[in-house]
Amino acid sequence: MNENNYSTYSKNLNLESDVEISIETLRHRQSNLKRWKWKWKWKWNNNNKQIPVIGKGIWLDIQDRLPYYWSDWTDSVDYRVIPSVIETYFNNLLPAIAFAQDMFDRTDNSYGVNEVLLSSALAGIVFGILSGQPLCIVGVTGPISIFNYTVYEIIKPLNTNYFGFMFWIYIWSMILHLILAFGNSVMLFQYVTTFPCDIFGLFINVIYIQKGIQILLRQFHLKINENETITDVSAGFASITVALIMTVFGASFKMFTRTPLLTHKLRTLISDYSTALSVLFWSAFINFGGFLKDIHFQKLPITKAFYPTSGTFRDRSTWLAYEAISTRDVFLALPFGIIVTILFYFDHNVSSLMAQSYQYKLKKPSTFHYDFALLGITTGIAGVLGIPAPNGLIPQAPLHTQSLLVYNSKGDVIRCVEQRFTNTVQGLMILATMARPFLICLGQIPQAVLSGLFFMMGIQGLLGNTIIQKIIWVFSDPDRKDQTSPLINVTTKSIIIFLIFSLAGFTGEFAITNTIAAIGFPLILLLSVIASFIMPYFIPKHDLDILQENVAERFTIKNLLLTNLCPNHESNEEDIEITTYETYPNHSENRCYNNVYETGSRSNLN
């Protein structure tokens, strides 16, 4: 590397004065640099064992975020919070109802609408008020719903009380959450790139579309009573029509900001309220008369206000669901608690990362260790109350952040309204929905509209998924490809290999959830992370750095870094991997690909 290259290299680093490195030092370090990007080095010296102090990550999280707590409320005085609250409420509420229906049918009515509503409300209020990163929406997810009814099917022959067993699963999981959080183990997410996040995002979005299809298939069968079901073809096809038309209009209006029509303010206004207005309009549409009055549209199921659903496995007069089980079953619940912990460890932290993606230009610090400990506490509370345990939601978490973005007339992100109001209020709104008047209103929404909402959210997520974008890139006309895209500098072979890894991970996640082995889903998530360590053997480093970027800005994950968790950590020449930048032709923004491991500063180095 010549003198000019070193000058450019040093300039592009743009490090703060306390960590600036001279050209001579760079030359010396470059000659000794070991390019093992993902090798984690535990250093030892004569006087200090370089392992983070117990609870250090949580302490740093609280220390960083607490000064912003008051501004998290005062910053809520912004127009963006109004459409965000409304959209997040519907995006969280209606899919949760669908998952409630699945658990109701497959757990002999153990879980119902009220359990899911209470879980979502608890998560929204607790994480809105107490979490370090209130942008991350927490609620009942598809994977935990699958887990709950799979556990029921497994333990049913054992004749043990289901809620007593679930209580111990969640208590074990809470203990493991706290051990992991206080043990600073969330620091491993500093190595997570967009690769496993995009696979999981693709999986969730496809699951949403699959769920929409499943709901429509149920419309062809009308349940008369517990033992009798009739075929209703007219209702089935009418529901398909309503769902598809709602999807077309709803998705089109949601993406209205991408068109040149009308003014910037009107485009934003239409996009802001497209989801809520779609749900309201198409719910009313079935009552417009004509031939529609001859169709029996199935509605969302509701139950008695503020009461547990099941009267078989628990006392309906109280929300305290604990039932005594044998000591054998208490320890039998431990492996299931480990599975829940692995699921939440990945699911929640990935949701949080995706809600804080670098494109959103966030300014306030994050709190991964503290939030994971808080999630453990809510998991234990869920076991006591006999409700599904909530955790980070995809695509709701990134959609929530997107709804708070402020754009200019050119469509560029200016800022994000980072505050606690939207998460807290949507949780309170879901809690209010458990009241009888609101339950009756909820019961007027046809299941076809719920299907349409699943399609809208799934399609919206797929359009923004980078795996889908890379597939489109491969099959695009070379003359029509965007010459300013970073992918223009990547070989087609590397993109294809990357897509093979990505689609293999997606196939594994999707396939296992449709089998009896669905309870092993967290293991597939871990395999997708391990795959990102293997890809450097198949894809050149330059190409791989472009294909899988860091998910969030460095200041977002700074409390995950060993240099911050261990103040006495001493770097040497072999421990430092210099940050590299790549400038693309006509591309205005340079991206940072590799982490910088430097000593003595906890500031944002990007």
Image (cartoon, rainbow, N blue to C red):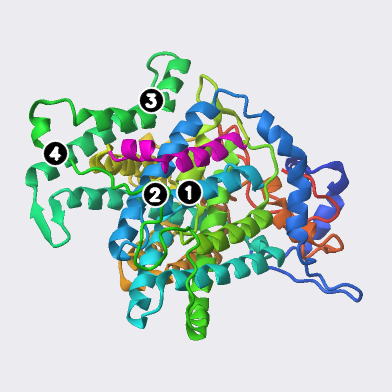
**Sequence order check: which comes first, mark 1 or mark 4?**
1
Q: Position of residue 171 (x, y in %)?
A: 56, 69
Find numbered disc 2 in the image and state the secondary structure of the residue it sits on: helix
Q: Quick check: can you spot residue 22?
A: no
Q: Amino acid at mark 1?
A: Ser
The residue lying at 36 percent from left, 66 percent from top is 149
Between label 2 and label 4, give the one nearer the viewer: 2
State the residue in front, 66 or 169.
Answer: 169
Pick the quarter of the image with the C terminus: top right
Residue for badge 3: 256
Q: Residues within 10 Å of mark 3 (few under 14, many from 20)?
A: many
The residue lying at 12 percent from left, 42 percent from top is 235
Q: Are marks 1 and 2 in contact (CB under 8 Å)?
A: yes
Q: Are marks 3 and 1 in contact (CB under 8 Å)?
A: no
| Number of the label disc, if any, that sits on residue 238 | 4
Would you say 303 lies left or right of 201 here?
Answer: left
Q: Are marks 3 and 2 in contact (CB under 8 Å)?
A: no
From the viewer's perspective, is residue 26 above or below residue 340? above
Image: magenta residue range: 420-443
**Sequence order check: which comes first, mark 3 or mark 1?**
1
**Sequence order check: which comes first, mark 2 or mark 4?**
2
Q: CA distance from mark 3 to mark 2?
A: 27 Å
Residue for badge 1: 120
Q: Position of residue 249 (x, y in %)?
A: 28, 29
Q: Quadrant of residue 53?
A: bottom right
| Number of the label disc, if any, that sits on residue 96 | 2
Find numbered disc 4 in the image and state the secondary structure of the residue it sits on: helix
Q: Is residue 431 located in the magenta-colored stretch of the structure?
A: yes
Q: Amino acid at mark 2?
A: Ala
